[in-house]
Amino acid sequence: MITGIEATLWLLERRSSYQRCVMTSIESKNVGGVKSGSATESMAGCPAHVVKDRLKVAGLRPTRQRLALGWMLFGKGHRHVTAEKLYEEATAMRVNLSLATVYNTLHQFTQAALLREIAVDGSKTWFDTNTSRHHHFLIEGENVLVDIPGHMVDIARLPPLPDGLEIVDVDVVVRVRRIG
Ligand SMILES: [Zn+2]
């Protein structure tokens, strides 16, 4: 039986001419075993397989829900999303997931280092598919984050740290707005 997520993936991939890839990905779910070099090579550029491989490398079982969200997150270049935004997209694409599942999956991806969590303000958590060291512009009023390469921000001075603490990371968010 084809589930809602399978059907949606199929439609999405068919529209973007990746039908063969995603169907192979789903059908080979229980096959396991070692992929031959040529098979891997023939799938180069196939987002569904790339997503599946990324999940496996990160130690996450490629469930249909993770594949669907992973495809939405990693299939189209770097993205900044909130759980709510991703949930809306999934709903619009008729991927039947709850907001709680989207939250959980985003946190699992973050723990597996596939995503980076960015705290922009107290009320909202953003997830970034670009896990390299970098900072952000936040365009106020549009709720859009734009990457700033890490080397373009020079943090010249930080206060002394309280005893027993060390810096994990410094995230810079430069708030900007459109002029006029
Ligand atoms: Zn970013």
Image (tube, helix red, strand yellow):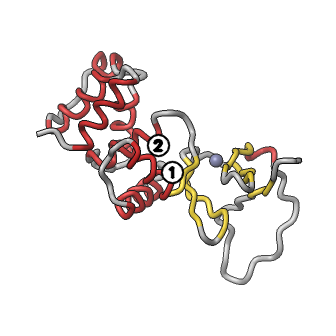
In the current view of this chain or complex, which residue is farthest to the bottom? 163
Q: CA distance from mark 2 to mark 1?
A: 9 Å
* The one of 96 and 174 positioned closer to us in this rendering: 96
State yes or no: Cβ of the residue under disc 2 lies below 8 Å from any atom of ligand 1.
no
Q: Residue at x 43, y 41 (%)?
A: 72
Q: Quadrant of residue 30?
A: top left
Q: Is residue 160 above or below residue 129?
A: below
Q: Residue at x 26, y 47 (%)?
A: 63
**Circle 2 Cα neighbour tier, 10 Å, few/some/many (<14 / 14–19 / ≥20):** many
> Where does the image place residue 8, in percent across and percent down from the top left?
30, 37
Left or right for 14, reference 30: right
Label 2: state its secondary structure: helix
Q: Are marks 2 and 1 in contact (CB under 8 Å)?
A: yes
Q: Residue at x 66, y 54 (%)?
A: 143
Q: Is residue 35 above or below residue 158?
A: above
Name the residue carrying label 2. 73
> Where does the image place residue 117, in percent across and percent down from the top left?
56, 58
Q: Is residue 27 above or below residue 137?
A: above
Q: Which amino acid lies under the numbered mark 2 shown in the image of this protein?
A: Leu
* The one of 116 and 98 positioned closer to us in this rendering: 98
Mark number, residue 115: 1
> Where does the image place residue 73, in percent across and percent down from the top left?
47, 43
Left or right for 103, reference 144: left
* The one of 180 and 30 positioned closer to us in this rendering: 180
Q: Residue at x 32, y 54 (%)?
A: 97
